[in-house]
Amino acid sequence: MIFERTTSSPGARFISTPYEPEVNTHSGFNGVVNQSSFIRTRSGVNTPAIKGQSKQDDNVVLIAVMGATGSGKTTFVNLVSGSNLRVGKSLQSCTTKIQLSQTFDIDGRKVLLIDTPGFDDTNHSDADILNMIATFLATMYEDGRKLAGVIYLHRISDIRMGGVSTRSFKMFRWLCGPEALRNVVLLTNVWDGVSLEVGEARENELKSEDKFWKPVLDKGAQVFRHDNTVGSAQAIVRYLVDKYPLPLRIQTELVDEHKHLTDTAAGAELNRELMQQIEKHRDELKTLQEEMREAINARDEETKKELEMERNQLQAEMTSLQAHSQKLATEYNEQKERFRHKVEEYQRQAEEEKRRQEVAIDDLKQQLSRNESNSEAEQGRLQKLLVELQEQYDAVQKSGVFTSVGRALDNFFARF
């Protein structure tokens, strides 16, 4: 049985499933366990940080945002975080690489959202997108950082769960795996694009059909509605912010089990799809070649030219698909190593800049204390400069290591 209740925050509606893995009896929103530290066990006993265990030394809550292209991921991230990430306005994909929001506060917790590109990207292959996401997630997990949750967006205004949406959600499930689903929010938006009756009918179908969301809900995922208000977005993030961080399946496969990307559940599924498409094109090519022989025998030059164009197009598509499959098999390890080096490079630069700022701040403080006899104007100028330097320093420290990670993402994936 599935029942509904609204949260105490306006604008978000929580759909509870029979699976309630974490229950809190404190006042406010039910279904959340508060954790004072990401490296504290459920029993409250501190344990040493180990590889794959979330150390979260900068105490930033990490939440990934996923979904098909055009589902509103970046708009949601900007709304709740106050960021200014680029939002797509055309049919072309805009989020072509992983982007990090600025950190923001929810109930005294620092939160950072990870905006990811969809697998149906108009500019890059699915192999490129999987390599990119796998590289980022594995690097973060190796550094002891796990996700508090994942938000998957779906437009309720879509008439049906079409091929692109179905495929995108299937890849999402392979990435997450069953264990992490208790920390997943399935978020429907664009409710103003349909009547409430139509929207609820579509929502009920998504929740009740095995081919859609029911298997995920049975494993602990939750459904929210987003009404495009800040309060709604905050309520959704608030539900995840105190969740006990869990690794995604692709993280444990790549890091703990040392699997090659093509041997992970997501990689194997994508490679299987690529092979199916290649085989389909081979069959189509055989048919075209037979039709070309008939056209040659009939001396039908016009038909022959048309068939030659189709054949060349099919051959080009097959070559492209084979190249994408090869990327899965060869690029991940090298790409991850280069990305890690880039992150470490920016971390070193950040440490050097931090030391320079600290020296500058100390120098200004000493000037202010030594030169109390300075004019009021000079004292005011020095004090203003000190405040500005301190604000810059605090802003950088607030994001911690993710300032370096964000710079590495912007630089490293610029070639995609």
Image: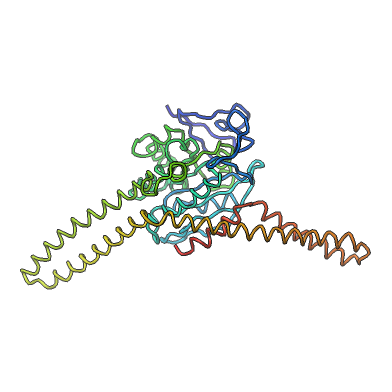
Residue 298 on image: x %, y % = 5, 69
Specify how the rendered protein is coloured: rainbow
Point out the image quarter for the C terminus: bottom left
Horizontal relation, residue 120 to residue 380: left or right: left
For this orientation, the residue located farthest to the right is 373
Horizontal relation, residue 159 to residue 99: left or right: left
Number of labelled discs? 0
Q: Is residue 356 above or below residue 41?
A: below
Toward the viewer: 253 or 73?
253
Q: Is there any visible trace of residue 194 in the rendered image? A: no
Point out the image quarter for the N terminus: top left
Toward the viewer: 170 or 397?
397
Residue 46 on image: x %, y % = 63, 33
Q: Is there any visible trace of residue 29 in the rendered image? A: yes
Horizontal relation, residue 61 to residue 306: left or right: right
Residue 299 on image: x %, y % = 7, 72
Toward the viewer: 45 or 379?
45
Residue 80 on image: x %, y % = 58, 49
Residue 90 image-quadrant placement: bottom left
